[in-house]
Amino acid sequence: MTSATRRYRGEARERRRPIGSQGDSGPGPADGHDAAVILERSRASVDPELRAVIDSLPGSMRRVALYHFGWEHADGTPTAGNAGKAIRPALVLAAATALGGPAARAAALGAAAAVELVHNFTLLHDDVMDRDATRRHRPTAWTVFGDADAILAGDALQALALGLLAADPHPASSAAARRVAACVVELCAGQQADTAMEKRGPAEITLDEVLVMAEAKTGALLGCACAVGALYAGAAEEDVDALDAFGREAGLAFQLIDDVIGIWGDPRHTGKPAGADLAARKKSLPVVAALTSGTPAAGELAELYAAPYDPADLDRTTLAVERAGGREWAQEQAADRMARAMHELTRAIPDPESAGGLLSLAEFVTRRSS
Amino acid sequence: MTSATRRYRGEARERRRPIGSQGDSGPGPADGHDAAVILERSRASVDPELRAVIDSLPGSMRRVALYHFGWEHADGTPTAGNAGKAIRPALVLAAATALGGPAARAAALGAAAAVELVHNFTLLHDDVMDRDATRRHRPTAWTVFGDADAILAGDALQALALGLLAADPHPASSAAARRVAACVVELCAGQQADTAMEKRGPAEITLDEVLVMAEAKTGALLGCACAVGALYAGAAEEDVDALDAFGREAGLAFQLIDDVIGIWGDPRHTGKPAGADLAARKKSLPVVAALTSGTPAAGELAELYAAPYDPADLDRTTLAVERAGGREWAQEQAADRMARAMHELTRAIPDPESAGGLLSLAEFVTRRSS
């Protein structure tokens, strides 16, 4: 191990903040790798690519996509801004930059747009399947345009994503397309496991299968984003795989935190009603950890979950998850996953200055409050 | 024009049979290009590719796909055979063979499987959107496995299709993937137009927009299949485009005949209840042609279509479409489209012996009785 790596590892440990702490969006690292700046720069570079490819869609699908991306209101008038943080394309560009500098970043813009298209295709479809009415503080596309238009817009976004990669003359594009296509299958498997789980009794679900599901649903695409960036930098296969693992672990940490926020988050930040996940009897990670904890609170939680939701029981349910150790477990798991992510990152990119962008983004997603 | 082309064109004219005639599956051409044999050979070559890629899917999506393809019953036990004629992969292979011989055919097997995967992805999704309960004489996937599993299996099949092309080292694979991805967008636009049309009053719909919709929904993928085969044969761009046009025109002929069969077809052959399209108030091509004919029968049909379906009115409705000229128009249009298809085919492949396979397949689809 070089002394740079040692310093970098020490720095990574030091920099880690309390994971999932509410509203902690304090100042970023002082080394010029501020996550907000990285995200903003990524948006400025990727949005024109995204807009161009979405504008190529025929009428009605373009309208659904522009609405879903937050660029238009339901009536087709332009909005002031756009929704979503676009973490995934930023990870593509950060990985490309870390391993290949500005030239690799420039080459990877189309691929970054492709990854964001895939993410949004899955959101459109997941919202239809889950009957979710709100996304990024707005009514979901299917509630505005109907199921068929939302499904078709999603299908078209997947085709745009893989078509963009097929049209990219870069030597890495076909390897990237293979990874993205395999990732779509994994995302679908994760969503399938999730919807199937919602139909089963809480007692039948193991913590392991929820973790596998969360890795497929969330980790896979963050990992794929990092791997695609590495491919465009011409990285060696083992470094591409290490970046995939980095993204997966960070993604799982992100999901754990997201689930914590889904229970204890402030509705003003989350855009969802308080206790929405518990009201929907969601078997999120902290809930399943609580249910399988063998504590007295687990029994109480199981009883509450077996009955239809009663708003009067919300506080008791929340407390039962906490007393059964669900919150603590999720926060510890998130910290553990982040440590593993750092380990993979240092393996592929020993130079802390080069890895800074990816590190900041990973810390950002696990520090988010909404 | 060479004398071979003249002979070929004459032969094509001579060979044309009454289009859409029921149960006319008489003996095929005597030149060794029998459509049934071509389809059977194509199946034998493509099915192993398809099975391998579908077997790579995670558990539940594999099960839905195997059921949908007709290889498994709903309980997961194997069936005796498979459903569907698999015209599209046969067109890929016939186009590759016509322009590049057996080597091109062998190279195009994965691409043929990809095209069939795309077709089946759209069937899975269309059935969910249209709430169609029957497909190939069996309950549709969503009725057996639920909407979410059918949507996800469709999503995964699209990813498998484009992933297969991305993994294909053939120099034509990325151009093929671009065409397939663009075709998916067109298929989605066609289905979108179709579902949107079903919500509008019959009087608001023009024949032109139904034709555009049918070309997008059906012609686009048949054209894409032929173009992909041509790409794998290393054909010149103008020949690739001519084969695309050939497939599109043949596809539109096929759709016209399919719509005729949807009204006048024998339920024993179609696998649908008699008059299902009219009962569903479907604005199929013959119906819109009838409605826009300006005849007295058009007025009668419009009145019938404005009222909820009454089985007692089925015969009257069927007769009104016929008397308003809907059937005749559709059959003439189909013949006209087939003539255009032949024109494009002779442009790209002047040698009748080479074009024989594609010609047989085009005639087969427009002669089908179910």
Image (tube, coloured by chain):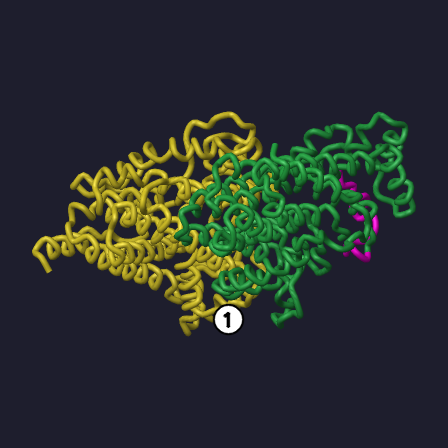
Chain colours: A yellow, B green
Position of residue A168 relative to residue B91, above or below, is above
Q: What amino acid is labelled 1 in the image?
A: Ala
Residue shown at the point (35%, 46%) measured from the top left: A173
* Region in magenta: B268-283
Dividing the picture into quadrants, the one containing residue B292 is top right
> Which residue extends farthest front?
B3
Circle count: 1
Q: Is residue A276 at all visible to an observer of this figure?
A: no
Image location of residue A120, percent across then percent down: 46, 43
Under tag 1, what secondary structure? helix
Residue ID for mark 1: A203
> Which residue lies at the image location 74% right of the left edge and 37% below the top edge?
B335
Instruction: Give the answer, above or below, for where B48 lies relative to A138.
Output: below
Residue extending farthest to the bottom is A294
> Where does the C terminus of chain A fall, quadrant-wise?
top left
Q: Is residue A297 magenta?
A: no
Residue B281 forms part of the magenta stretch? yes
Residue B84 at what x, y percent from top left?
66, 57
Residue B313 x, y percent position in the rendering:
90, 43
Q: Locate residue B59 relative to residue A13 in the image: left or right.
A: right
Task: Sort mark 1 into few (<14), some (14-19) or many (20+) by Cα contacts within 10 Å.
Answer: few
Residue A293: image quadrant is bottom left
Q: Chain of mark 1?
A: A
